[in-house]
Image: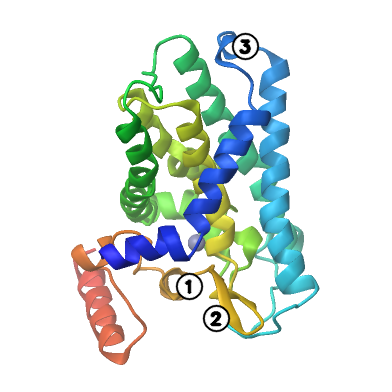
Amino acid sequence: MLRWVADRWFSIAENTILVVLAYVTWRWFQPSLEEARTLAPGWIAQIYVRNLVLLVAVAGGLHLYFYTWKRQDRRRKFDKRDLSKGTSSFTFKNQVHDNMFWSLTSGVAFWTAYEVLMFWAMANGYAPNLLWADNPVWFVAVFFLTPVWISFHFYWVHRWLHWPPLYRLAHALHHRNTNVGPWSGFSMHPIEHLIFLSSVLIHWVVAAHPIHILFHMQHQALTAATSHTGFEDLLVKDKSRLALGTFHHQMHHRYFECNYGNLEVPWDKWFGSFHDGTDASHAEFKERRRRLSQTS
Ligand SMILES: [Zn+2]
Ligand SMILES: [Zn+2]
């Protein structure tokens, strides 16, 4: 587990890139807490546009690279099928347009709303503030603990989203995608965006700096795109340079009732919902599903 955590931070750079991005955003594209004390259209619009640009850059960039320009063909791709066109289950009968629509409307709106709420609460002293000078060790630790907390929160809200009434109402929209692309990750029903992004509310209790909030929210929104790329990693000259999607979540889109979490912490193993794609694991999965269908 320690090696996995170390890999995620030091050799594979996703978390590290996100810390740098949070810093850049905070340093140059963030309204001051002074400004955030009163809700005003100016600074809120600034955050909205910033988030829109970030998502278009990351999800759009990955889409162009892997699907429009096909720079990697099907190497390291989980599912051989192309993204769906002409399927009536998708809004606009087009998977990519459907996914872009839900990500860029509801997704960016809820992402912005949570950030605005947190900055406003911090500016007015409703949510506790943490400064570097208060406790530098803890300040750094919050970065490491954020993905662990997100993973824990995601595992449980995700299981809840599979509760049939809530699934039909909200989460089914995300699961229209059985074969995923970069725009699929953040493509969710507004109710799911509300629930999924609520992990940041922990900072009403745990003191944070605005940069931690940025890291937290960008992690949520942008790794949704990277983790649904549909490819396992980005290859440069046949060498893996950046881990992207996981087979783990790909299996979730294939079989639904397994792998609710991510691989940051092995929640699925600990709570009995793990599927690693082997025959033994598939037999166990079918047995679990049979038991569940008997009890409900
Ligand atoms: Zn998914
Ligand atoms: Zn699901």
Residue nearer the viewer, 117 or 29: 29
Residue topped by disc 1: 250
Q: Are marks 2 and 1 in contact (CB under 8 Å)?
A: yes
Residue topped by disc 3: 35
Residue 82 makes an appearance in the image: yes
Q: Residues within 10 Å of mark 1 (few under 14, many from 20)?
A: many
Q: Residue at x 53, y 55 (%)?
A: 223
Q: Residue at x 41, y 10 (%)?
A: 125
Q: Relative to 50, is 265 above or below?
A: below
Sequence order check, earlier mark of 1 and 3: 3
Q: Measure the alpha-carbon separation of dots 2 and 3.
A: 46 Å
Question: Picture coordinates of residue 38 (x, y %)?
Answer: 59, 8
Q: Measure the alpha-carbon separation of dots 2 and 1.
A: 7 Å
Q: Is residue 137 left or right of residue 295?
A: right
Residue topped by disc 2: 78
Q: Residues within 10 Å of mark 3 (few under 14, many from 20)?
A: some
Q: Amino acid at mark 3?
A: Glu
Q: Is mark 1 within 8 Å of ligand 1?
A: no
Question: Picture coordinates of residue 74 (x, y %)?
Answer: 66, 85
- As helix, strand or loop, the secondary structure at mark 1 comes to helix
